[in-house]
Amino acid sequence: MIGPELKIDIEGKRFELLPPLLSGFSLTVEPSSVVALVGASGVGKSTLLRMIGGIDTVFTGRVTVDGAPAAEAPPPGFVFQDPRLLPWLSALDNIRVVRKDTTRGEAAEMLRRVGLAGYEDAFPHQLSGGMQRRVAIARAFSVNSRLLLLDEPFVSLDRTLVKEVEALLQSLLDATRPTTVFVTHLPEDAAMLADRAVVLAGRPARIVADFRFDSRRGDRSRTELEHIANQIAAASLEPASYG
């Protein structure tokens, strides 16, 4: 299955009493590609995710998912900065609650795919932080396996756990090929997971670099990962521009 094409054309997005966050901003995300949005906090990365997800509609311009307005497209699978599990529901029911058509069998299969077979009846407080993140990933894929949005998905994990969750995501992305947009402020994470890294800076935000990587995700050597991360980091130091 191939993920949808995303087209983002923002004429203007602003918050009251502040300079425009986005103005004249355009970006196309190819079907089944994995694109990292990299930039400093406050540059507009998470706002762009909410626009793609159809959550934020207060802007001028157009965001489409396979040609349909984002707000009218099927909801994406969304992984937030924290797992956002409901504490009174089991791991299995945390998956089912966001999509009523998901059967117990389908939810159990998603838990198996993220390495949590046998934890169907566990409650969030009985799971480690890394396990909670796995449930959140399983939930996102159960909502929409064609479009995945990740908002700083590793921000609260130590780097050992990050490597485990990145490996899990790599396997799921390879198996299901969703169109994926993920926000990060760490070039290392973009180098590990992305086919393409779009670096944002300034206000209104602009694209200061757009890196497309020829090598396959998951097959990059440590040297290549360091080179890619250094490229992204250097571009991220682009001076901010206002007005």
Image (cartoon, rainbow, N blue to C red):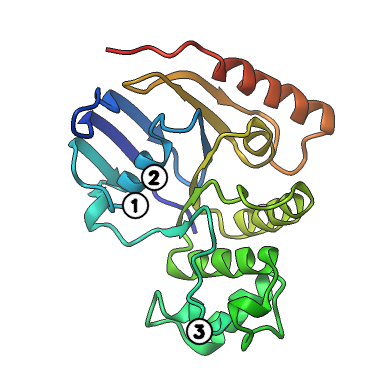
- Mark 2 and mark 1 in contact (Cβ < 8 Å)? yes
Instruction: State the residue at coordinates (30%, 45%).
Output: 51
- Label disc, if present, on residue 53 of the rendered structure: 1
At mark 3, the secondary structure is loop
- Label disc, if present, on residue 128 of the rendered structure: none
* Quarter where residue 113 is shown: bottom right
Looking at the rendered structure, the kind of residue marked 3 is: Leu
Q: Does 216 appear above or below 110?
A: above
* Quarter where residue 97 is shown: bottom left
Left or right: residue 30 versus residue 16 is right
Q: How far apart are marks 2 and 3 (CA)?
A: 27 Å
Q: Distance between the residues labelled 1 and 2?
A: 6 Å
- Mark toward the start of the polypeptide (2 vs 3): 2
- Residue in front for this viewpoint, 176 or 234: 234
Residue neighbourhood size for the residue with mark 3, other residues' Cα within 10 Å, grouped as few (<14), some (14–19), many (≥20): some
Residue 12 in the image: x percent, y percent? 20, 28
Residue neighbourhood size for the residue with mark 2, other residues' Cα within 10 Å, grouped as few (<14), some (14–19), many (≥20): many
Left or right: residue 107 versus residue 58 is right
The label nearer to you, 2 versus 3, is 3
Q: Does 233 appear above or below 179?
A: above
The label nearer to you, 1 versus 3, is 3
Q: In which quarter of the image is the C terminus?
A: top left
Q: Which residue in the structure is indicated by mark 2?
A: 49
Left or right: residue 25 versus residue 45 is left
Residue neighbourhood size for the residue with mark 1, other residues' Cα within 10 Å, grouped as few (<14), some (14–19), many (≥20): many
Left or right: residue 200 versus residue 115 is left
Looking at the rendered structure, the kind of residue marked 1 is: Gly
Instruction: State the residue at coordinates (38%, 82%).
Output: 101
Q: Which residue in the structure is indicated by mark 3?
A: 89
Residue 133 in the image: x percent, y percent? 61, 63
